[in-house]
Amino acid sequence: MSRNNDNFFEDVFEVVKLIPKGRVSSYGAIAEYLGIKSGARMVGWAMNSCHARPDVPAHRVVNSKGLLTGKHHFPTPNEMQNRLEKEGVKVKNDKVADFEKLLWLPRKELL
DNA sequence: TGTTTGACCGGTC
DNA sequence: CGACCGGCCAAAC
């Protein structure tokens, strides 16, 4: 991905956009890929602006435990889970099933 | 300029 | 298992 973006958000969005359909990623993984180790907060915060980025599948981004922590920030909490299941990702009790399998690590996949 | 707050993370109690 | 703490970095107030 290109780091020509001066905006911190853009970098996050770039990675999130690269998440394949039917897969999920975690804030920590993205943060680490971007170089900010414990900057998972920044990722989450950056995602706060994702409402203006329809290209950014925020629903594919969950926390390290696979929990849909960000669902409360969607227009409707139901939408995040609904979208995931629509893409083939099964969600159980607000958490991603087989999270470890579906977890998409940019550092590993794009290496 | 300093404090508060986050869609987090890991560890501890 | 739930609550708390420190860390990390950036924006909002």
Image (spheres, coloured by chain):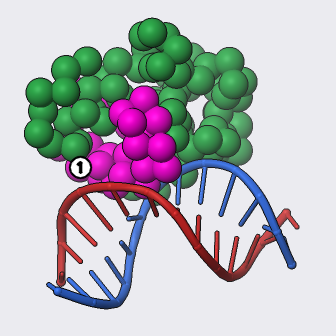
Chain colours: A green, B blue, C red
> Disc 1: which chain?
A
Q: Is residue A53 left or right of residue A59?
A: left
Residue A59, quarter of the rendered image? top left
Q: Is residue A96 left or right of residue A2?
A: right
Residue A60 percent across, percent down from the top left: 46, 31
Residue A92, quarter of the rendered image? top right
User: Residue placed at 51% from the left, 33% from the top?
Assistant: A29
Q: Which residues are magenta?
A: A31-58
Residue C7 percent across, percent down from the top left: 52, 63
Q: Is residue A34 above or below residue B6?
A: above
User: Residue placed at 35% from the left, 18% from the top?
Assistant: A18
Q: Is residue A15 above or below residue A109?
A: below
Q: Is residue A41 above or below residue C11?
A: above
Q: Nearer the viewer, residue A101 or A41?
A: A41
User: Residue placed at 40% from the left, 43% from the top?
Assistant: A36
Q: Is residue A25 above or below residue A2?
A: below
User: Residue placed at 23% from the left, 49% from the top?
Assistant: A49
Q: Nearer the viewer, residue A41 or A52?
A: A41
Q: Is residue C1 left or right of residue A110?
A: right
